[in-house]
Amino acid sequence: MKRTAQRLPHARVDPGKTLRFRFDGRTYEGVAGDSLASALLANGVGVVGRSFKLHRPRGVFGCGKEEANALVQLESGGYSEPNARATLVPLYEGLEARGQNAWPNVRSDVFGALGVFKRLLPASFYYKTFMWPNWQRWEGLVRRLAGLGIAPTSADPQKYLKQNVHADVVVVGAGRSGLEAALATSRDPACRVLLIDEQEEPGGGLLASPAAADRSWLEEALREVAARDNITLLCRTTVNGYYDNNVLAALERLSNHHGPAAGGAVRERFWRIFAGRVVLATGAIERPLVFPNNDRPGIMLASAVREYCHRYGLTLGERIVFYTNNDSAWRTALELVDAGVPVVAIIDLRPAVESELRQRAREAGIALHLGTVVTDTRGRSGLRRLVLHRLAGPGDALEAPAGTLDCDVLAMSGGWTPTVHLYSQSGGLLAYRDSDACFVPERAHQAVTAVGRANGEFAAPLNLQPQWLTPGVSAEHQWVDFQYDVTASDIQLAARENFVSVEHVKRYTTNGMSVDQGKTSNVNGLGILALATGRPIPEVGTTRFRPPYHPTSLGAYAGIELGALYTPFQQLPAHAAHVAAGALFEDYGAWQRPACYPRPGEEEEAAMAREARAVRSAVGLLDYSPLGKLEVRGPDAREFLNRMYLNNIRTLEVGAARYGLMLNEAGIVIDDGVVVCLARDHFLLHTTSGGATTIHQHLEEWLQCEWTDLEVIVGNATTQWATLMLSGPKARAVLAQLDGDIDVSREAFGHMQYREGRLLGQPCRILRASFTGEVSFEISVPANCGLSLWEALMQAGEPHGIVPFGIETLMLLRTEKGYPHVGADTDGNTMPQDLGWGGAVANKPDDFVGRRSLSQPVGSDPGRFQFTGLELLEADARTVSGAHILTADGESTAGYVTSAFHSPNLNRTVALGIVADARDRQGEEVTVFYAGQRQRARLIKPGVYDPAGEALNG
């Protein structure tokens, strides 16, 4: 690879504007209009990367999205981008890049010695080679050696946007075919046309054409596009996905070409496109040929050599040889000779070529080698020599050696593959065309049309003779997937091991699974698999292309949905007071709630212990506002709720409250809470905090779809009321100090009763229910009064030692008391009888949702996980939620710890769990397993704190 001092004329770069950049710690210069790849080539940099598995040296291979070798790490810190294709990175001043998967650098990678062990690293070697003494011994080494770029660890400082757009016609690709399609469809002024192209400027393949007529046509077409108001042109935009209903996803690069210098500018925009009709003018990708050591730096696609010449003004080498099986490479070679590029030979494995092409090549002084194949390449860090053999016949064994040929660039062409990825994603079917050895669109599933080379319409016949690998020589060093080091022998091995499905072979060998997703390796891989299994390629089939077509940054998917905008969270009415009290906030569903209130220098567990002791001995205050509050009213409200709850709601009196369970049709517990009767036809349902919305929807579904005759209205009042829980032996004394008209004395206001009135001049609702096991008042006032009520209660409770306590402290207290928490102490199989509610089911005379399922045998199967308490037998033993309860033989799981805390009030760990047949095994010793440690525990009745309930009724 030679250094280019001067550019060829007519290139689309500006030699007068120099740009400095760094690669692997060295400083180079390029010019405006360069890509990083063209700038490296212009500076004679041959090795730009290393392969994934064997760390073989890799040079620039293509000129666009098909590039499989030149993957670099761009920039550093928050601007760092791994696996960037140098061919798609526009050069900018100060660009910083380095090679990947190498140490100390890609020029001198010490891990390049892995090539010596290639025989030990065949396809899926990790399932075979490192099984002794065990995989774990080798895993760390394999993981360190594997990998490409390094994911950034710093926060991304750049901005991203999302945008939706509707268009009557979307044209993907702004080459000749795409521009013609856009101009034709836009003749109707009412037709909105969106023209999208992934390159820095529109033009497609015309940008690399030396013909003056092509350049003139392009300029005129672009003027016409700009003049039409109903055409929107998006350059630097890649369509990455084609989905149902003609919805496309595209990524527009807005400031990538400025790098970190763009600062806070928007880097990328993610487009969601709703199209009436789609025209795919996505072109075609040239395929490499498969032959021994075809992966050396300096071996490139012929189309890439052409584009670097005409678009970037680079000659690349001093002795360029073409190797092909079709006519397109001949036309490219003749073009380059006309441009002054030193093409010295054409090697064609076909025995005969069109006479006109042969005549023109001879007149240009190009040596011709027909019926010849390359059987080896030589060179250390770049290409130096080719070894040639004559073919005995099409696809036959080798004949006689044909000598060697010195060169520094080999431009190869094994045919063309239409870019049908988006067409396939749309559901369109593909057909294999033997004459051109490629898959072309056959039958569309949506309103989509492929045109131009994307439809297999080539400007001139290819006269192609396919040859999927070189015969007569070992397949072990014939590379198919250059990045993942997949060779023809790997695919043959997969076939011998009975992998016949192309999807299985793809995953077993990893062919086509690198960053380029097989854009140059898929069809060659199919051809080799067809030969190995004795089947034609149409029978072998092809993989189903999946989005994204090109790697998409995670920031683009996120857009502005970051931080507080990621999932809009709700703040408590007294949020300001919690902040002032030093609350440790955590996300609980959609709410930001205090977990506890650590004092300066106090750990979270210590804060929870202090708060729990205060609630048990004095009084604590909890912001309980997220507790679900659904109001159900109407003439049939009582009947409706009686059907929805396992409990008997029919007998619930006005002013009374009752704890209830709600089931789904399968009899599974989905929610619990306290039901309050406000009037004969008006009820207040308390749900779990995370279940307010889903239970509301659940109730509406039954009303709207099943029981349309019932006159019932359901409203979600959760956010209309601020709810504060005052809990502890001194709770009544604190509440009594506030100005209100509700008698809170023990005689007037008992447990599970409800009162309405006024408190501090505001309407309020008070419920005597407890999730802590202590005397508790759940006080609800209008949400805008929540902060003032909090402050008043804290002030009134100060003489009594009041403390604010958080959700984690509440969970500790209810675990001490043995109360189950639906969603934590239940799973998707928990039925009422697993919680000890079998009697309530039997005693209810009426039907309810889920009752029929409860009568099925599965509800009484042995081994059902049932709710239980757990007592750890070792002194000071600790466990965590999620720990396994083992079977008697210690070999499998018989349950789980679902809640576990260290109790400061009992001075030991308290735990709850779901364990197989727990109700019949009370007192039995079990083993708790977590993180490799085993502990002894005993199954006990839940509720080790105040089992008689004396504190609750104090």
Image (cartoon, rainbow, N blue to C red):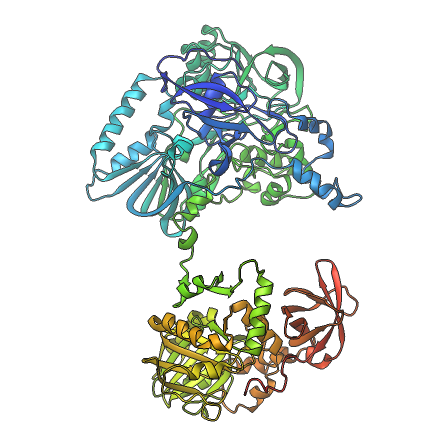
Q: Quadrant of the C terminus?
A: bottom right
- The one of 885 and 292 positioned closer to us in this rendering: 885
Question: In the figure, is residue 472 to the left or right of 890?
Answer: left
- The one of 149 and 907 positioned closer to us in this rendering: 907
Q: Quadrant of residue 504?
A: top right
- Residue 628 seen: no
Q: Is residue 879 above or below residue 198?
A: below
* Residue at 66% over, 68% down: 896
- The one of 54 and 186 positioned closer to us in this rendering: 54
| Residue 198 point in image, percent of width and height | 38, 34
Q: Quadrant of residue 914?
A: bottom right
Question: In the figure, is residue 933 to the left or right of 73?
Answer: right
Q: Residue furthest front?
A: 799
- The one of 448 and 511 positioned closer to us in this rendering: 511
* Residue at 74% over, 60% down: 933
| Residue 470 point in image, percent of width and height | 63, 25
| Residue 51 point in image, percent of width and height | 61, 30
| Residue 8 point in image, percent of width and height | 40, 12
Q: Is residue 567 above or below residue 773?
A: above
